[in-house]
Image: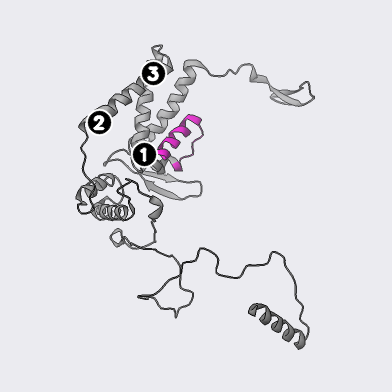
Amino acid sequence: MQGGQIAFDEYGQPFIILKDQSTKSRMSGLDAQKSHILAARSVAQCLRSSLGPKGLDKILVSSDGDITVTNDGATILEKMDVEHQIAKLMVQLSKSQDDEIGDGTTGVVVLAGALLEQAEILLERGIHPIRVADGYENAARIAVEHLDTIADTFIVDKENKEPLIKTAMTTLGSKIVNRCGRKFAEMAVDAILSVADLERKDVSFDLIKIECKTGGKLEDSQLVKGVIIDKTMSHSQMPKELNDVKMAILTCAFEPPKPKTKHNLNVGSVEDTTSFMRTSRNSSQK
C-alpha cells in the first residue's frame, strides 16, 4: 500500500499508519492562537470595504451560478463557503447581530477583527489570553457607561413620528433602497407602531410580513394594514375585487381527508355503477 501501512489494535480492528505521520505535529500555544486570529481577521477583511454608507457592493456567485449583489454583512457571510471553525464563529456573530438588532452586521465583524488584531500584539508580549479577555470586558463596561452619559433620548409618540423616521433612515443609507429611504422609513415606522406594545416596550416581528413580487419599481412598494393572501384565481370569471364581504380564514385543509390505504374498484356493469353511486350518496348524507 502506497503512503502507509496497515496495523491492528488489541481488538483486531485495522487502522492505517501514514508514512509522514511522525513528521506532523499538532499546532499549539501562540502559533495556534495566531492561526485562529488570522482566520477571523481574513473574514473581517472581506467585509471591511463594504462598511459604511460609501461601502462597496460585493458580487457573490454560488456553485449553481446564482449571482448576488449586496453589501449586507450577514448576507455576504451567509453566502460564503467557510470551513475554518473560528471563521464560522464570525459568521454566527453576524447572524446573531442580525437576529437580535437587525442592523450592524458588518460593523460587528469588522470590530471583532480589529480587537483580535490588537489582541495578537498583546499575546506576542507574553500576556495571557485570559488577561486580554478581562481587559476587553472592562473596556466594554467603561464604553457602555460613557455611552449612557452622552446618549440622547426621546419619547416614542405615535403622534410625532419624525424622530423615528429620521432614525430609520440612518439604517437605510447603505442599502439598495436608499434612494427611496424616506418612503421605506415611513413604511417601517408605520408597520412597527401598528403592532408595537408601547406599555411593555415590545414589538412582535412575527406580526409583520414582507411579500416580494417580481417586477415593478421600488416606488410601487406599499404598506397594507391587514392580511395579504398570496393566492391565484381558481377561475378566470371570479371577481377581481369585492367590498364589504365576510371572509373565513381556515387553518386546516379544505378538502376531504385522503385514505391512508389504497383500494381498487372494478365496475363491470350498469348495475354496479348505480349501486356505487347510491352507496356514495348515502354515505355523504350521513
**Residue at the image position 38 percent from the left and 24 percent from the top:** 116
- For numbered disc 2, what is the local secondary structure? helix
**Foreground: 175 or 17?**
175
- Note whether 36 is above or below 269 in the view shown: above
- Amino acid at pointer 1: Thr
Q: Residue 79 location, x and y as percent?
A: 45, 43
Neighbours of disc 3 within 10 Å: few (<14), some (14-19), many (20+): some
Q: Is residue 170 left or right of residue 133?
A: left
Of tags 1 and 2, the one toward the viewer is: 2
Identify the disc placed on residue 132.
Answer: 3
Q: Which residue was labeled with disc 1?
A: 105
Q: Give the amino acid type for the residue marked by disc 2 in the picture.
A: Leu
Q: Is residue 249 above or below residue 244?
A: above
| Classed neighbour count for the residue bearing mark 2: other residues with Cα under 10 Å, few (<14), some (14–19), many (≥20) | few
- In the drawing, what numbered circle is on residue 147? 2
User: Residue 22, image x and y in percent?
Assistant: 64, 16
Task: Identify which residue, 139 or 31, lies in the foreground.
Answer: 139
Real-space Cα distance between discs 3 and 1?
Answer: 24 Å
Quarter containing the N terminus:
top right
Bounds of the magenta segment: 78-97
Query: What residue occupies the far right of the structure in this picture?
Result: 12
Residue plotted at (37% across, 33% down): 109
Name the front one of labels 2 and 3: 2
- Mark 1 and mark 2: span between their CA atoms? 20 Å
Considering depth in this image, is 60 or 143 the residue closer to the camera? 143
Q: Earlier in the sequence, mark 2 or mark 3?
A: 3
